[in-house]
Amino acid sequence: MLVNLLSVAGVMKTIGGVLLAVVILLAMVTIHEFGHYIAGRLLGFKITEFSVGFGPALLKKRSKKTGVLFALRLVPLGGYCAFDGEDEDLSKKEEKGDKTNEPFEEMTADDGENLKNEGGMSATNENPSVTQSENAEDDPQEENKKEDEYPEPQGARFNDQPPWKRIIVLIAGATMNYLLALFLIILMFACVGRPVYTVTESDRFQSAAGQTFEGLQAGDTILEINGKTLYMLTDWQDALNGKKKGDVVDVLVIRDGKKQTVPVSLYQDASVKNMSDSNVIFYSLGLVVYEEVNGEMQLVRYLELHSQTVRDGFFQTIGHSFMYSFKLGGSVLRSLGELITGKLGIQAMGGPVTTISVTAEAAVSGFASFLNIAALIGVNLAVFNLLPVPALDGCKVIFCIIEWIRKKPINRKVETIINLVGIIFLLGFAVLIDLLHFIL
């Protein structure tokens, strides 16, 4: 009975973690699209729809004030802010004229008459399922009432706006992701504390009795190495990389409740292979020590690093929050760089399934872990979306800059094809790395 209860509790925890992961991802995507929406409204863009999720609409409501359609859709792993004319080919626009492509264009009397002669039924673009009855035609007050209830969205079409305005709208999504992530980091640092690492004894190995080691000791909370504040393990690597065996580094620690600087003579050379190479930290700082005993190398010391938190003052919290957010963004760029150069294997990445799995595990580990993983995803989305990769906002910004310099746009059809190929590539790549992650 107890085993069954534990099994049910484990399943419920897993389900809860997955739901929290989906909520985090959906919130980050929504705030990204909201950034596009706010910038677009402020700069006079014509916006036709703002949707959370993809697929069939579960809920939808058109604003009586702006005419914008707001929708909640079935698949909760995305969203979009639809700008009128964003993906339109200008050559078609010039041939047909602006009005033929207006999503809220009213049908003329001649068009309606032609449709009736052909046996068709006229309908507005706002609600194609509702036919226009003869009573509505005979009642102009009823028609005016409908127009007043759902006005046509105001503003200029996306590609008719100056390039600088489009650039602002395009980067607004990533900006909102970063600002939300920064807020979550400040909240985490203020309420829980800044993440640091503490040296602890391992449960799997006990050092030989009576044997002493200089340098770091169990219980030390490590704050800095050679004056560099440590936010992530990559900071440890950067502080140690290139140092040789016997070099002395100054480590600022909290020992017995007091801050003090401990000189540590490196036990081994510190040569970092890639950002996942954490072993260099343990071996060079003497947390893991092998010694030759009777002609064989034996493990004589094995300490671990456990994540802890420290509280700082108000201004220190704000400063550390900004630095931590920059470090997160830098780690994203660094991982991509190491993937491109081959220093880091593709198995180190993860697609949507892996992201949800890792996020779910972190989300149920505690309030600090929940805020930390949410902030990481926010910074990740901000940086990733600004990369000059087809289909991403960064690539669209490049097209706008080229248009700004040339005083004329690149062929819209070519731009659309490039972005379409980019979408196909990104989706295929996401599926591939998920498969490789589970296979390898």
Image (tube, rainbow, N blue to C red):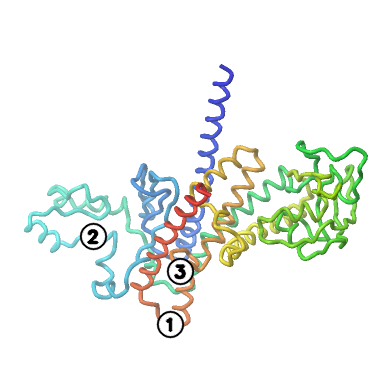
Residue under numbered circle 3: 396
Q: Pointers 3 and 2 in contact (CB under 8 A)?
A: no
Local packing at callout 1 (Cα closer than 10 Å; few below 14, some 14-19, many 20+) is few
Residue 303 lies, in percent from the top left, at 80, 44
Residue under numbered circle 2: 106
**Vertically, is 57 above or below 162?**
above
Residue 99 in sight here: yes
Please give the name of the residue rendered at 61% of the width and 47% of the height, measured from the top-left corner: 373
Say which element carries label 1: loop
Q: Which mark is residue 407?
A: 1
Quarter-of-image position of residue 256: top right
Q: Pointers 1 and 3 in contact (CB under 8 A)?
A: no
Q: Nearer the viewer, residue 284 or 322?
A: 284
Which callout, 1 or 2, points at the residue further toward the start of the chain?
Answer: 2
Say which element carries label 2: loop
Mark 1 against mark 3, which lies toward the viewer? 3
Query: Across the whole image, how many numbered discs are drawn on residues?
Result: 3
Identify the amino acid type marked 1. Answer: Lys
Residue 55 lies, in percent from the top left, at 35, 48
Local packing at callout 2 (Cα closer than 10 Å; few below 14, some 14-19, many 20+) is some
Left or right of 274, for residue 429: left
Q: Which mark is residue 301?
A: none
Say which element carries label 3: helix
Residue 239 in sight here: no
Which callout, 3 or 2, points at the residue further toward the start of the chain?
Answer: 2
Which callout, 1 or 3, points at the residue further toward the start of the chain?
Answer: 3
The quarter of the rendered structure image containing the N terminus is top right
Please give the name of the residue rendered at 6% of the width and 58% of the height, measured from the top-left corner: 117
Q: Nearer the viewer, residue 430 or 145?
A: 430
Local packing at callout 3 (Cα closer than 10 Å; few below 14, some 14-19, many 20+) is many
Q: CA distance from mark 1 to mark 2?
A: 34 Å
Please give the name of the residue rendered at 91% of the width and 50% of the height, measured from the top-left corner: 214
